[in-house]
Image (cartoon, rainbow, N blue to C red):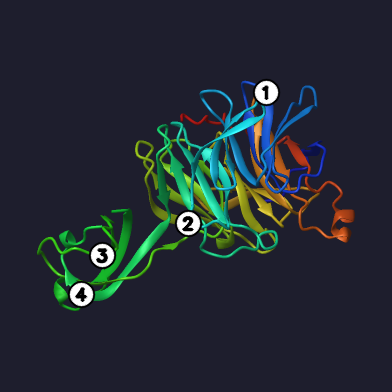
Amino acid sequence: MEMMSSLKVEPVVKFSALIGEGPIWEESEQMLLFVDIAGQKIHRWSPTTNQIESVETGDTVGFAVPRRKGGYVAGVGLSIVNVDWSTRTMTSLLKVDQDKPNNRLNDGKVDPVGRLLAGTMGKEQRPAEVDKQQGSLFSVNSDLNVTKHLSQVDILNGLDWSLTCLSLCTSLTLRWTYRTGWTGLSPVCLSVPVSLSGGHIERVGLVSHLSVSLYQSHSQVDISNGLDWSLDMKTFFYIDSLSLTVDAFDYDITTGQLGNRRVVYHMREKEGLPDGLTVDADGRLWVACYNGGRVINIDPGTGVCLQTVYLPVMKTTSCCFGGLDYSDLYVTSASLGLGQSEIRHQPLAGHTFRVRGLGVKGRPSNSFSG
């Protein structure tokens, strides 16, 4: 379905961010919070005064979200930092992907109970061009404990062990293939948590045999991007941009564990790369399409694109609902990587836009509990 004629699309934050991203509506302040990743700044814009306040981060900044204690937490470089807006100062809380110094934090968002989820990616060689399988997805709880998601170790064909024969120190998930009772039945894939101890596997018991051999762990993430939750909090929606899909996981709101990954939507020709997303009050998805110049509205139950909102820029990056009744859709965009000819044809590239007349509303954002 194409864009409705009653829509009004207008630039409201009128400066060219290099990579505008991560918009969040702050209800308490009635302001739009967003970042400029490559510009290394966190911005707050007031629609009442049309004024912009900014904090320089000194490194790439993938996201900023409100904190229940006050201020914000932001993803700067590979650090999760506390941001004191009143003093314009930052304090590091923790680091992720320390074994991958060429990575950076990208999109992040807080779940309904206050848990932060944030992803990483390899630093761009050019916009949207990165080393693949370098990213990760992390969750951070109120105690600042970090859990890493979406990496795996493959186990295929090897020695004879039982399920109780695997003893390791870092929590991982192993995948293997086995034939029931060694009778030549069809292969079955299982996943179970194990732990790694000193880089070797210890035999600690005997039960029915498995044929296994250990391969190194690898990331399943290229560009960790948009994320949000269903209305009942049982589904986590997630975008790894280079996969060209919008995915869903079963989500345990109590533990933060993910499972049962499946594809909700495959991007179509000319829609570009899926980037940031938000879920509206009806449970439908709004996905910004990088290099597609649009935001698409998806029914996650059917996988159907219900509506397309076109913008006067190609590098649309993310979106959120805001305003007094959450009926305004705010859309960020990027200008980095555009040539002079493209800039002449897209003079509003990097601006943040407001879309009115959609006939739907969004939901308030969540604040980090840590």
Left or right for 336, reference 279: right
- Occupied quadrant, residue 233: top left
Instruction: Decide which of tag 1 and tag 2 comes sooner along the chain.
Output: 1
Dot 1: within a 10 Å radius of its alpha carbon, few (fewer than 14), some, or many (20 or more) residues?
Answer: some
**Helix, strand or loop status at disc 4:** strand
**What residue is disc 2 on?**
99
Left or right for 252, reference 95: left
**Helix, strand or loop status at disc 1:** loop
**What residue is disc 3 on?**
200
Q: CA distance from mark 1 to mark 2?
A: 39 Å
- Occupied quadrant, residue 90: top right
Mark number, residue 30:
1
Q: CA distance from mark 2 to mark 3?
A: 20 Å
Q: CA distance from mark 4 to mark 1?
A: 61 Å
Q: Position of residue 71 (x, y in %)?
A: 59, 26
Q: Is residue 359 visible?
A: no
Circle 4 or circle 2, nearest the eye? 2
Dot 3: within a 10 Å radius of its alpha carbon, few (fewer than 14), some, or many (20 or more) residues?
Answer: few
Dot 2: within a 10 Å radius of its alpha carbon, few (fewer than 14), some, or many (20 or more) residues?
Answer: few
Circle 4 or circle 3, nearest the eye? 3
Circle 1 or circle 3, nearest the eye? 3
Circle 1 or circle 2, nearest the eye? 2
Q: Position of residue 191 (x, y in %)?
A: 29, 59
**What residue is disc 4 on?**
159
Q: Amino acid at mark 3?
A: His
Q: Amino acid at mark 1?
A: Gln
Instruction: Decide which of tag 4 and tag 2 comes sooner along the chain.
Output: 2
Q: Amino acid at mark 4?
A: Leu
Q: CA distance from mark 4 to mark 2?
A: 30 Å
